[in-house]
Amino acid sequence: MSYDRAITVFSPDGHLLQVEYSMEAVRRGSTVVGIQGKDCVVLAVEKRATAKLQDDRTIRKIFSIDDSTVLAFAGLTADARVLIDRVRVEAQSYRLIMEDAPSAEYLARFVAEIQQKYTQRGGVRPFGIATLLTGLDPPNQRPVLYQTDPAGTHSRWKAQVIGGNNAKSLREFLEKQYTADLDEAAAVKLAVQALMEVVDSGAKTMEVCVVRTGGKREMLSESVVQSTVQVLEQEQQAAQQQQQPVE
Amino acid sequence: MSYDRAITVFSPDGHLLQVEYSMEAVRRGSTVVGIQGKDCVVLAVEKRATAKLQDDRTIRKIFSIDDSTVLAFAGLTADARVLIDRVRVEAQSYRLIMEDAPSAEYLARFVAEIQQKYTQRGGVRPFGIATLLTGLDPPNQRPVLYQTDPAGTHSRWKAQVIGGNNAKSLREFLEKQYTADLDEAAAVKLAVQALMEVVDSGAKTMEVCVVRTGGKREMLSESVVQSTVQVLEQEQQAAQQQQQPVE
Amino acid sequence: MSYDRAITVFSPDGHLLQVEYSMEAVRRGSTVVGIQGKDCVVLAVEKRATAKLQDDRTIRKIFSIDDSTVLAFAGLTADARVLIDRVRVEAQSYRLIMEDAPSAEYLARFVAEIQQKYTQRGGVRPFGIATLLTGLDPPNQRPVLYQTDPAGTHSRWKAQVIGGNNAKSLREFLEKQYTADLDEAAAVKLAVQALMEVVDSGAKTMEVCVVRTGGKREMLSESVVQSTVQVLEQEQQAAQQQQQPVE
Amino acid sequence: MSYDRAITVFSPDGHLLQVEYSMEAVRRGSTVVGIQGKDCVVLAVEKRATAKLQDDRTIRKIFSIDDSTVLAFAGLTADARVLIDRVRVEAQSYRLIMEDAPSAEYLARFVAEIQQKYTQRGGVRPFGIATLLTGLDPPNQRPVLYQTDPAGTHSRWKAQVIGGNNAKSLREFLEKQYTADLDEAAAVKLAVQALMEVVDSGAKTMEVCVVRTGGKREMLSESVVQSTVQVLEQEQQAAQQQQQPVE
Amino acid sequence: MSYDRAITVFSPDGHLLQVEYSMEAVRRGSTVVGIQGKDCVVLAVEKRATAKLQDDRTIRKIFSIDDSTVLAFAGLTADARVLIDRVRVEAQSYRLIMEDAPSAEYLARFVAEIQQKYTQRGGVRPFGIATLLTGLDPPNQRPVLYQTDPAGTHSRWKAQVIGGNNAKSLREFLEKQYTADLDEAAAVKLAVQALMEVVDSGAKTMEVCVVRTGGKREMLSESVVQSTVQVLEQEQQAAQQQQQPVE
Amino acid sequence: MSYDRAITVFSPDGHLLQVEYSMEAVRRGSTVVGIQGKDCVVLAVEKRATAKLQDDRTIRKIFSIDDSTVLAFAGLTADARVLIDRVRVEAQSYRLIMEDAPSAEYLARFVAEIQQKYTQRGGVRPFGIATLLTGLDPPNQRPVLYQTDPAGTHSRWKAQVIGGNNAKSLREFLEKQYTADLDEAAAVKLAVQALMEVVDSGAKTMEVCVVRTGGKREMLSESVVQSTVQVLEQEQQAAQQQQQPVE
Amino acid sequence: MSYDRAITVFSPDGHLLQVEYSMEAVRRGSTVVGIQGKDCVVLAVEKRATAKLQDDRTIRKIFSIDDSTVLAFAGLTADARVLIDRVRVEAQSYRLIMEDAPSAEYLARFVAEIQQKYTQRGGVRPFGIATLLTGLDPPNQRPVLYQTDPAGTHSRWKAQVIGGNNAKSLREFLEKQYTADLDEAAAVKLAVQALMEVVDSGAKTMEVCVVRTGGKREMLSESVVQSTVQVLEQEQQAAQQQQQPVE
């Protein structure tokens, strides 16, 4: 079979195989969780397979695009870097020309349209990444959460998971656990709890970022994440003990 | 077989396979219904597979092109976004140069010609979408309904269905039910009734838009759609009871 | 076999397969009949497979190119639209530069040369259409009839059929029935009679256009066509009765 | 085998297959005969497979390039038209720049070099035609006869045949019958006689053109050709009677 | 299978095969070790397969990019030379425009982005090299260690190994032996010790370079390296004797 | 196997197959002999397969490039014509710019470099010709003999044969017969004698050209060639009689 | 297998097959030996397969690039000529712009980078040659010896062999025989001795060039080479006699 060669073409059943294959590259990437809270959006990323001697700073999967916009990705790191550079340039030139910051939706759409172009023209392959992007929504300066995928679609979410083999079950987990108007602590807790389903070793293998209404962005320190992890572990133990029969 | 590779070429029996494959992508998309009423056109779309936590606003399948023009699509979302952006720009530049709004037919033809180009040149694949476009017909400012498909044809319809596996049977349903000069309520009712053949969960999974003579466009609220759904369900129950034998 | 891939190349026996395959697309199109009369040319087209709710106006297969030039096609509608747009632009710019209308032959040659180019260069496929084009012949302003095909040839005819599976037998029918210097009524009657060999449902599924000496062009109304159909049906019945043996 | 794909490449035994296949297209074309007389060149063409209702004027295979230059071809009509247009433009621009008519050799070389280019570059296929071109030779304004073929060679001939399945045996016929310094009547007779070997129905299926010293070019009328045919038929009958044994 | 032809495309399981194959070229290259010390970074390279008569200077695998930046590579030498030339030009033009030296991170990112581009566009193959790059970190002018790979990722390391078949086990060796804040002597010793795991013939087959805080870069002489080798060999012998049982 | 497709690539054993195949086209061409005499160079060409009615002048295989430069080729005529046109233009522009005639070596190198380019770039095939070129050597204005081949090499010869199936044995014949400082008569005789090994019908099927010191070039008349042929035939008969045993 | 088609791509084990195949073309070329002496570099080339009648001057394999730079190659002659032309132009333009001669290293790097480019881009094949280049090293104007290969690497050598099937064993021979600071006579003798291992017929089939400190370059005459050959043959005979047992 060769429907996926030379150019991204349709298979007889209407699929773009190169796009679907690139989604496998996303699936083989790290897990990224995004949670929309009342006055914040939380992005939490699995720092999978960090080599012991690798410097943490260069393997970050959460990138700032603008003062108030943050992007996390799952998939091919090199592809992500290139795409991120292009969004950063776009964000700056928008600011220069419009004398205002671009909205999160504008940037998410920008990312998605680049990704779409790489699925329709010959001579290039699709980008092997999905992204979660959070930035401000102009009317009320409240942060919002967008997702883009290799096909070039972008969509807005209350909570979403990309990357990893368990993205689907994590999404179901979030659907059960998510409630509207979470305060920041609760949103962080939910994001960390979701990651703990796929991550073993606690705060060290997580990266958590909060974007707040009005645009303040903060990478949470490992200790702050660790304390959330501990609270969750204690709750888990307590829950297990309750379930154990009393003899 | 390789008639579908590298460039959209003819198969020995005169088919363009890539175009036919892209129509499969349309078939795998959501169902879109369009009804021409006396003083309006109604577009109704199935909001299939909406993830629970996804924001409704970003998965809309009905897009405004211009003050008085609306486009709904079935097929690949990313392809649609790109095409919609190009129509919007065309609509604006037409208005600037001609100092008048483009007619619905002008815009439908514009969409179709872009789609055709992607079926005849090498290095690109066809767009994986069909569209229903409604806008005004200049002489009397009455809204009209156009369809375009991946092959690049455009045509005008009194009522039409695109997308979904049951498009053909829905089209037959419309052929039986459609009558000329429907008022707005009746046109909305017919559109919703058609969607209910393929949709289970009522108004939540539908999006309905009305374009009225003179150009007023309105997205119907979920409650308005829901009341139409309820009326239809009651009629259906009544019809079933009538059919049941009295014991 | 792959003589038909990537670029239109010769097969070992000197055929251009892509061109021959595109002629299959013409064969799968509607039937178009053209008749040269004394002071007119008649084009008659089968309106095959018109969906019940489709607006007749957008599925026409007879297009005006210029005040006095009309083109009908068989094959892929989307391809035809693109080609028609190019001829229209050429006709207008010819008129602007030459301060005179282009002759039918000029426009037929223009159509054919575009079609030829798409059979010799890589990266494109041939147009999947044949056309009948009628317009004026400058010296005496009498309408004449031209045909073009996917290979890019153009030729002039007294009567010709393109499209449909029965084009060949219809051509033989015309060769038997055609006489020189038909008046308009007789030319229309012959064109309709030819179409009735492939069409069942009468005037509704036919579109007939007359171009007259001096350039008056007229789309015949359905009622006019219908009366011709009835005359023909009565003649047919009379003929059948004559053939029946008297008991 | 795929030596003939994508680009005209050499086969292991040093052949250019696409060129040889295009010569099959020539072989499948009509027969064209050219005869160099004392003060003239005669071109005679078989009008094969003329549809009954087709207008003779548009299926001519002899084209005027310039006042004194004429070209006949065998092979794909659409390819010929395109090439002829290019030679006509070249002839005109030569006349404009040089203030003199181009020689027959100049134009034959021009045709041949275009044909050669289409055998050496990728992305195009060879022209599927051979041509006989006759025009004046400047020193004495005497017409001369050139041939070009799909490979891009041009050569001068006293008498030559291109096209048709019997070109080779016709060439042998000419080698036997040709004598130098034929007057116009004898040259026409020889050309017609050659065509009669492959054509059944007389003058109707022949087109004959004479170019005379000083540049007068004339398409012979059907009646003139017919009388030549009759003379030849009478001679043939007489010859057959002579050969019959007297009982 | 042909997922790796003509253009770097995704395989069904989301891999870019050409990129993975190019990593085999890296694996077939020489071993390069980088160690971050307290006030220095040490790069040590295996000079494998040095022909006896080859001039050492031209087979160096450690290249200066700038006064304070050094790059070592594993893989295809010719590819490396081309890439190094481009980084050198970038470093110079940065200095000219910014009137400051580029940081190590800037240059590592530059190298990586070139490498990424060669994995996404048609008509080129990926670079068959990985690099270790060390230069200064602007705030405190302390040298830092970066790695890039054929996929186009760049990352910062405390200690890293690229190239050779034993890169993975050497990396584990470094993970066990590495401690923070090594002084220069200890960092050199660790780098040499790592290389000795894959190299037999001592200092002659090693190249060692030190970049110090503030930017002083020094290629260690063979004698200095040799003395480190000897110390390590003595320690090794001592360790072996200790392990031997006393009889 | 497909090492010879799409682009001229190396086969596993280091051959460029398309180049070797094009040499087959040379081998299938006519035989060309070149002899360096004391004050002349002689080119003699086999006029193979001349059709009886073809005009000799247009099938020449010896072309003048410049007043003092002559080129003969073996292989595809159409390719040769194109290459010859380019050399002629180069010769003229050299003369214009340098105000001197180009040397034979300059032109031979020019031909060879064009031929080489067509063996290294994609989208074109090699030229299917070899050439012998003779022109003046500036210092003493003595003519010299160069050869070029489809691979793009050029080399100088005292005597050389290209084209035909017997080129190799003819080359051995020349190696035995050639002596230095041949006067013109002897050089012509040797060239004709070589051709007679492959040609049957005497002077008619030969074309002989002499370039003399100082640049006088002359095509020998058929009668001159014929007398050389006769002398050779008489010598041959005499030799055969000597060899016959006396009874 | 098709890893070697259309573009130079990696095979699964990280090889560039087109590059390795082109090295076969080098292996099939003549043997070239380079020796670094104290105040000179000697290049000696096997003149293999010289046709008896070929002019020696045009089959040279040692080319002057500049007053003081000389290049010898093994592999495809036509490729070499093209590359040599480009280096010569570069050497001249360097001299014009820098008002100084380019160093041998600069030119070797220039050659290598061109060769590398032809291994990474689509649409071209690698150059089928390796080169030995000798020129001056600016500081002390002493000649140095560089090698480049089809992969695009360049490296400096004390003594090196390229081309021929026995390059590897000749290299081992040189490794045994080479000593530092050879005077010119000894360097020439060593180079000739190496060639004699693969060449039978003495000085006639060798070409020897010496570049001396300060830039004097000299092609040794055949008689000088012959005397070296004789000395070596006498030494060889003497050595053989010594080895023969005395009876």
Image (cartoon, coloured by chain):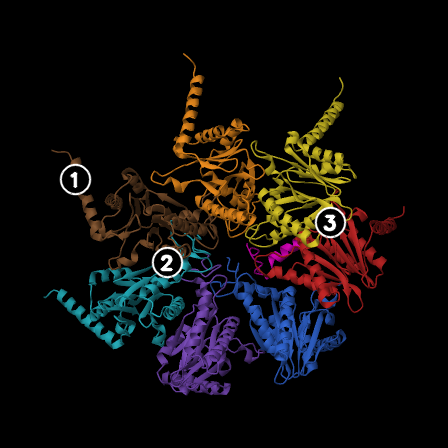
Chain colours: A orange, B yellow, C red, D blue, E brown, F purple, G cyan
Find disc 3 in the rendering and name its residue: C59
Q: What crowding class fits label 2: few (fewer than 14 Cα within 10 Å), some (14-19), or many (20 or more)?
A: many
Badge 2: chain ID: G
Same subunit, labels 1 and 3: the answer reads no
> In what element is the residue under mark 3?
helix
Chain of the residue under label 3: C
Q: Residues within 10 Å of mark 1 (few under 14, many from 20)?
A: few
Q: Given the image, what chain letter belongs to the residue carrying mark 1? A: E
Dot in front, 1 or 2: 1
Q: Secondary structure at mark 2?
A: loop
Residue lying furthest left in this view?
G247
Residue F63, percent from left and from top: 50, 79
The answer to whether residue G52 is magenta is: no
Residue B4 percent coordinates (x, y): 57, 50
Q: Nearer the viewer, residue G111 or G1?
A: G111
Disc 1 target residue: E238
Q: Residues at marks 1 and 2, common chain?
A: no
User: What percent of the width, then of the height, locates residue D83?
Assistant: 62, 68
Say which quarter of the image contains residue F176. bottom left
Quick check: can you spot residue A221?
A: yes
Identify the residue at horizontal 71%, vertical 30% (top origin): B228
Amino acid type assigned to the residue bearing label 1 in the image: Ala
Residue at point 38%, 63% (across, down): G128
Q: Is residue D45 left or right of residue G90?
A: right
The part of the chain drawn in magenta is C1-24
Specify the amino acid type for callout 3. Ile
Position of the N terminus of chain F, as image quadrant, is bottom left
* Three-letter amino acid code of the residue under disc 2: Ala
